[in-house]
Image (cartoon, helix red, strand yellow):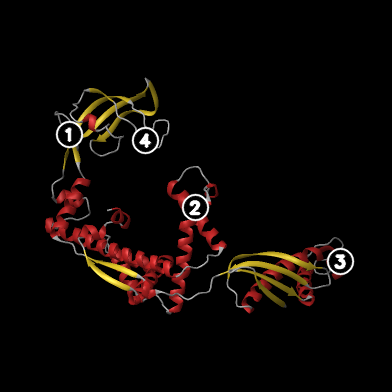
Amino acid sequence: MQVSVESTSALERRMTVGVPVERIETEVNKRLQQTARRAKVPGFRPGKVPMSVIRQRYEDAARQEALGELIQATFYEAVVEQKLNPAGSPSVEPKSFEKGQGLEYVATFEVFPEFEVQGLETIAVERLQAEVAEADLDNMLEVLRKQNTRFEAVERAAENGDQLNIDFVGKIDGEEFAGGAAKGTQLVLGSGRMIPGFEDALVGAKAGEEKVINPTFPEDYQNLDLAGKTAEFTVTVNSVSAPELPELNEEFFALFGIKETGLEGFRTEVRKNMERELRQAIKSKVKNQVMDGLLAANPIEVPKALLSSEVDRLRVQAVQQFGGNIKPDQLPAELFEEQAKRRVVLGLIVAEVVKQFELKPDADRVAEMIKEMASAYQEPEQVIAWYYKNDQQMNEVRSVVLEEQVVDTVLQKANVTDKSVSYDEAVKPAEAAKAD
């Protein structure tokens, strides 16, 4: 077998492979002999058909099959021989082939970029330090109470925070518009669910009252036919209900699966969850900074095949997440290219860090991570047992642990500063923190 390789770009390779005629004929004859043992030809008993008849009837098909399999096999042999690492499937074009002669074909494909991870010492990471204070715990209990607010009907005028049951009809220039009417809608005043001015105009309304209000749609409203226009809504208030926060009692604790431990036991469980959330938030922010630093310090070219595959994967995820009667390939590729490129480049860089520093998943950390995840459930032992019986889930945990070890490896060389912050600031999503 003869092989020559030409670099047509930084990642693209054009490989010419020559397969000798002897190997082709050996594969063709092998298939003809297999066919002869089972072929049914009128006038002959199975297995007794002359090879000349078999060749006449089946040689073309056997040759096509042999050539297809030879191209696959010799391509693999050639990339191993040339120490190439293809990224995606090759485009194969037969260059020359005639019966009785060798086969020559050209395979065009991309290879994975070859690089060493650099610049770890230039990566700056701010590592947050925080703890769950008693005030943080008290605030969280109030949040949990508000999330389980009940509304009780009242006879007084509506206030911000009350829940109204309303019917409404909206008009613009005296004409009703699509989506501008509803019956029996539950609306909490001050929630910001309706357009600006709608909820404010209902403060002071009473059950049984009809009000005509004139809010204006925002200039950037998603429905361009309504954007910037002032509407007239006729609103009927069916009922006004005031919020009532639940008491911190056994009934309330049972909503969270916590029984017979009283207020102190409930506070202990809530604190554990808050501390778990705090650890994860800090870890996530450190990881994001490390990954951003690795990207900035190691600009690499991305194989188009990998980028295309990742775009397709993101398209499928988008359809699964948002639903609708749409096929993944109907979504424009450019919507996902930036995210796909980041994921592909990070995948290549992380894999190279693993290789460069000879990292392997730490068994103790895998066990600790499973224990940590299981602790959020009522019967953690069953969750732990389930993980250890499920190879796919175990491999996912190992991948996460290995990624954490990559982060730890970078942190050993990066410029890390610690910063003490409040619990709220530590758990705040990075996007919200940047906006602040």
In the displayed image of the protein, which residue is found farthest to the top? Answer: 174
In terms of sequence position, does the residue under pointer 3 or pointer 4 come before the other? 3
Measure the alpha-carbon separation of dots 3 and 4.
81 Å
Foreground mark, 1 or 2, reads 1
Of residue 38 and residue 222, the one placed in the foreground of this image is 222
Numbered mark located on residue 159 in the image: 1
- 114 up-or-down from 171: above or below: below
Numbered mark located on residue 53 in the image: 3
Visible residue check, residue 11: yes
Could you tell me residue 296's position as x and y percent? 42, 67
Residue tagged 4: 219
Could you tell me residue 17's position as x and y percent? 71, 73
Three-letter amino acid code of the residue under disc 1: Glu
Measure the alpha-carbon separation of dots 3 and 1.
96 Å
Q: Residue at x 39, y 65 (%)?
A: 292
Answer yes or no: do the residues labelled 3 and 1 have beta carbons within 8 Å?
A: no
SS for dot 2: helix
Measure the alpha-carbon separation of dots 2 and 4.
33 Å
Foreground mark, 2 or 3, reads 2
Q: Count neighbours of disc 2 (C-alpha within 10 A) and say few if under 14, some if 14 to 19, many if 20 or more.
A: some
Foreground mark, 2 or 4, reads 4
Answer yes or no: do the residues labelled 1 and 2 have beta carbons within 8 Å?
A: no
Residue tagged 2: 316
